[in-house]
Amino acid sequence: MAVDSSLVDALALNFIPGVGIITQRNLVNHFGSPKAVIEASSGELQSISGVGKKISAKILAEKSTAYERAEREIEFADKHQIKILLFSDDQYPRRLKQCADAPMLIYYRGNANLDSARIVSIVGTRNATHYGRDRCKELVETLSDIDDVLVVSGLAYGIDSYAHKISVENNLPTVGVLGHGLDQIYPYANRNLAVKMLENGGLLSEYPSNTRPDRQNFPQRNRIIAGMADVVVVVEAAVRGGALITAEIANNYNRDVCAFPGNVDLEYSAGCNFLIKSHRAHLITRAEDLGYLMDWQINSEKKSASQLQLAISLSNTEKTIYNLIREKESLSIDEIAQLAGEKQSKLAIILLELEMKGLIITMPGKIYRPFSIGSSL
C-alpha cells in the first residue's frame, strides 16, 4: 500500500520531542510544509520566533528516529483501521480547527461524522449520583430526538461513560476522546462500551500508540472535548476536577456552556452551581432548555421503540396522571389528587408505578415532575 509522503513528514515532525503545537504551526506556516521544516538548516530554523538553538538542534538530531517511528505508526494505524487526520485535511474536525492550540494531527477510529450539524460535549464527575445519572439520561434521550447530533465525552468513569452508554442505547452517535493511544482502553472496565461505540461513533486521540494514560494527558485532552463541540454540558461536578477545566476551556473557545444546578449541600453539585453563579454557564433544568438555548428543533415523532412500548403498557389512570404532570411540568400530590379526583392512598401507588417506569421523578416536598417532557400518552 502506497503511503502518503506528506503524512509521513507530518508524523515525523510531530514525533520530534520538544517541538510544541504552537511552534509546529509557526514553523509549518513559515516553511510551507512539515517536510520543508525538517529539511531546513539550523540557521533557517532559528530565524523563526520562538525557535532557538535547543529546538533547532532537536529537529536536526531527532529527525531520522522520528521518521522511523512515523513509519511504524502508519503500519499500526493501517492494521487497526485508524485514520490519521492532519490539520490540513478536509476530514479534520472543522470546529477543532478554529482553536489556536488544536493538535496538528489526530488519530480516529470509527464512523461518526466529526462535523455533525450539532455536537454536544457532556462532562461531569467520576462519582456520579443517581441525580446526575438521571439528568444525563434525560439529556441524551432528548438529544436522540434532534437530527444529526453527535455526543462527545471522555470515556472516564461516572458521567462521561454514562453519557456514552445512554447514547449507544439510543442509537445516538458518540465519540470518546482519550488521554492515551488507541492501542488501549482506559479505564479497562469501559472496554466493552468502547467496542460498542465503534459501531455508531468512535474513539479519538491526539496521542500515538504506546502512549500511557498518564495524569498530565487528561487536562490536555479536555481541550479537544471542548473544541469539538457547539456546547459543553456539565451534568454534575465538584469545584475541582476535569469537568470544570473543560468548561473553562470551552468558555475561552467561545463555546456555549450549560450546567444543571444541584443541591447546595452536595459536593458534586458545587461545581455546577459555581459555574452558574459566576456566569460561566447557562442554567438548564432539562434537555428542552438546551434545545431552546441552541435553537435546535426537537422532533417529537422521533421516539424510541422502548418509549412507545412503555406508553402502551400504561393503564388509563396512569396515562391520565402522567399527562397531568407533564402538562403542568410539576405538581404536588395534593394538586394531583384534586385534579384527578383520586384518593391520595390510591394515588401514591400510581405515582410509585410511574416513577418505577421512569416516567416521573419525585422532588423534595413530594413534588412530581416528568422525567422527560414529551408527547402526551
Image: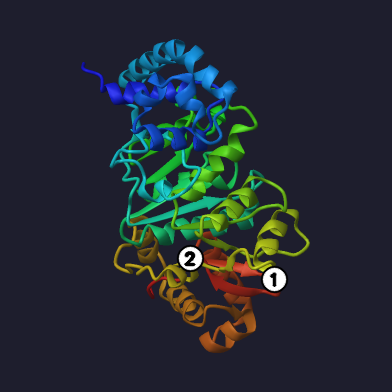
Give the farthest residue toward the left. Answer: 1
Query: Which quarter shows the N terminus?
Result: top left
Residue 269 percent coordinates (x, y): 69, 58
**Height in image: 317 above or below 43?**
below
Instruction: Decide: few, some or many residues near mark 1? Use Cα within 10 Å; few <14, some 14-19, many ≥20.
Output: few
Q: Earlier in the sequence, mark 2 or mark 1?
A: 2
For this view, does 189 lie left or right of residue 204? right
**Height in image: 80 above or below 170?**
above
Circle 2 — which element?
A: helix
Residue at x 52%, y 39% (from the top left corner): 155
The amino acid beneath tag 2 is: Ala
Residue 362 lies in quadrant = bottom right
Query: Is residue 104 visible from the viewing direction of this image?
Result: yes
Between 244 and 73, the residue placed more toward the observer is 73
| Residue at mark 1 | 364
**Height in image: 153 above or below 337?**
above
Between 303 and 118, the residue placed more toward the observer is 118
Residue 60 percent coordinates (x, y): 48, 15
- Residues tagged 2 and 1 counted as in contact (Cβ below 8 A): no
For this view, does 262 lie left or right of residue 44? right
Calculate the distance from the C-alpha at mark 2 to the C-alpha at mark 1.
21 Å
Residue at x 50%, y 55% (from the top left corner): 137
Residue 83 lies in quadrant = top left
Between 304 and 2, the residue placed more toward the observer is 2
For this view, does 340 lie left or right of residue 312? right
Residue 260 percent coordinates (x, y): 60, 63
Query: Which quarter shows the C terminus?
Result: bottom left
The amino acid beneath tag 1 is: Pro
| Residue at mark 2 | 287
